[in-house]
Amino acid sequence: MSLKVERLNKSFMREISMILASEVKDKKLKEATITDVKVAGDLSSAKVYVRVLNDDEKDEIIESLNKAKGFIKAKLFERHDMKHIPELNFIYDESIDYGNKIEKIIESLNN
């Protein structure tokens, strides 16, 4: 992965978090936490990984984020000197759940 893409990943993660915290009107979206951003090497798309406080609302919040991606892209365009902002795809981050599952398996093997 190029240095430029790594910098974009970190920058987008920080900027999208700030946009959700201070500029989005939907209060439910303020509950979303951006855990990672993976911009494609050709800068055409970006996967934005999200965790939410209440797992019961995760589908609704991911759907709302995907509906608000035009607004978020516009804000990113204002903040970055780029001709084209990658297409944003918001995805629920299951890595923590997967880690907990592995931990339980290891714990059961030790017992």
Image (spheres, rainbow, N blue to C red):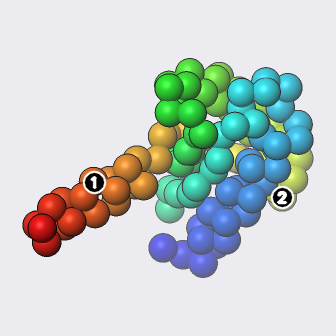
Of 82 and 88, which appears nearest the observer? 88
Of 34 and 45, which appears nearest the observer? 34
- The residue at which mark 2 appears reads as 81
Label 2 or label 1, whichever lies nearer to me, is: 1
Which residue is pictured at 48% across the width and 73% down the height?
1
The tally of labels here is: 2
Residue 93 in picture, x, y percent from top left: 47, 47
Residue 62 in view, yes or no: no
Q: Secondary structure at mark 1?
A: helix
Which residue is pictured at 71% across the width and 27% down the height?
28
Of 50 and 85, which appears nearest the observer? 50
Distance CA(mark 2)–CA(mark 1): 41 Å
In the image, is residue 75 above or below residue 10?
above
Residue 21 in picture, x, y percent from top left: 82, 43
Classify mark 1: residues with Cα within 10 Å, few (<14), some (14-19) or many (20+): few
In the image, is residue 51 above or below residue 54?
below
- The residue at which mark 1 appears reads as 101
Looking at the rendered structure, the kind of residue marked 1 is: Lys
Q: Secondary structure at mark 2?
A: loop
Residue 65 in view, yes or no: yes
In the image, is residue 86 above or below residue 63?
below
Residue 80 location, quadrant: bottom right
Q: Left of 13 or right of it: where is 26?
A: right
Of 103 and 14, which appears nearest the observer? 103
Looking at the rendered structure, the kind of residue marked 2 is: Asp
Residue 25 in picture, x, y percent from top left: 85, 26
